[in-house]
Image (tube, grey):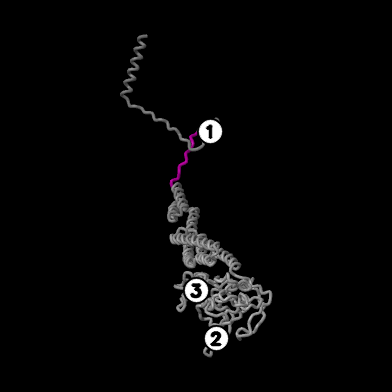
Amino acid sequence: MTLLVLLLAVFLFIRWQRRDTGPAVVKEAVPVPVSRGPVVAPTPGQPASTPVVPQKDPKEETYKERVHDAEVAIEAKHWIDAEDAVKKAREIFDRPELKTLLERVAKGRDDEEAVAKAEIEARRRQEAKWIQTSQREREDREKNLYDDAWNALEALAREFPKILEDQRFIDVRKHLRLVREDADTLNTQYMASARKAFAEERFSDAILWAKRAGDLYPERMAAVKEFQDRVNDLLLRKTMVRVACNVPCTIGSEDPKDENPVRVMTLQPFYIDKYEVTNEEYLGFVTASGHAPPPTTKNVPPVWYLGKPVPGKEKHPVVNVSYADAEAYAAWAGKRLPTADEWEVAARGPDKREYPWGNAFTEKENVFHCNCVEYWQLTKTLYGTMPVDAFDGANSASFYGVYGMGGNAWEWTSTSVMRTVAGKAEDFRVLKGGSFMTPAKAIRCATVYPEDPTLGHPDVGFRCVRDVK
């Protein structure tokens, strides 16, 4: 047993010596095949085989990369890059798909150029329309047509939305908005003043304020017109008298010749001013229309001074007006001047009275019905016109309730008569009613006094009539 152990030890010692002194033998690891596809089970009874791994073609891979680059460039609309990628791909393989890519590049270029041309044309049309619209906006704004100007800008923005980015458009619309808002505010204030004056029965002021509102904002004229119609309707009821000519009225006289013949008139009904037109009312006309005011008188106490009635004369009849002045006022007020026949019928009525208030000039020596020569001679009052309602309490109304048809101021009528002046026939107009400068005879209803219509006199005024609709 000991011998066996000794022999085993010697054997191990000899093996160990050979390991250290001999060449080392390195065993290489067996390579493990990598699967590149589905593993096919070997057929039973056959030995298993190792799958073949296909090798990539470098040229094919490069070609695919170039095609991909071309497609990306086309999507990004980088036409030069796309053409360059196609060219490089064709250097590898000249395949039909490359022609398709180049056709896509050509179509993309054409579409892009068409869009660019369309944008240029749109900008050209936008600029032309902007020039036209901006000019219209300026003209409309100068005419106070703010709504039209604003609508023109809005229509431009709807047709060319990109104009909203144009600083010129932004500035013009901002300025117009501010101007339009200011005009709207003033229009509202003016109409509020007009309504206040109307409520206080200051009808001339009401019409004047409404006129200012309409001038400031003409596009609101419908509301202004509706208000003015209401004012005029009330004025018609409060300041005019309806002359119902449903019964015959005798006018004229046997002497002098201008007054004859005596005749019976049956006229169509009409409205006539209850009083002569006052300085206050005429001021409203002058202010609203720009018509020249009456001149300042020199030989008698002035009624107008520096374009306005003298304080205290507002309710006096307006005088120093020509026939054309009176006619212009009547047209502005929506009325007209009466004919001489209409005037006399309104003053005289159907009872053939001599004076507007009756057949006697005065019942008592110190009681007068009008402002005339006899009145100021007896009373020693200031020589001149008086307020139109000064004799309201003296039973001075006519048969139809019209006041002041005798004395104070002559009144223009539209009746024309021919007169010879320096051997030449001239067209004169008939005055009626007498004045503070005439005696009782001139104040008779039948009096006819022809006068040069181009002249104004310190004792000549007018009243208006309106047809019954």
Rendered position, 212 above or below 357: above
Q: Nearer the viewer, residue 77 or 358?
A: 358
Quarter residue 333 falls in: bottom right
Label 2: which secondary element: strand
Amino acid type assigned to the residue bearing label 1 in the image: Ala
Quarter residue 401 falls in: bottom right
Ranked by sequence position, the earlier of labels 2 and 3 is 3
State the residue position of label 2. Answer: 426
Secondary structure, magenta segment, majority class: loop
Ranked by sequence position, the earlier of labels 1 and 3 is 1
State the residue position of label 1. Answer: 41
Residue 241 visible in image = yes
Label 1: which secondary element: loop
Ranked by sequence position, the earlier of labels 2 and 1 is 1
State the residue position of label 3. Answer: 291
Asked whether 50 falls inside the magenta stretch, the response is yes
Q: Nearer the viewer, residue 390 or 468?
A: 390
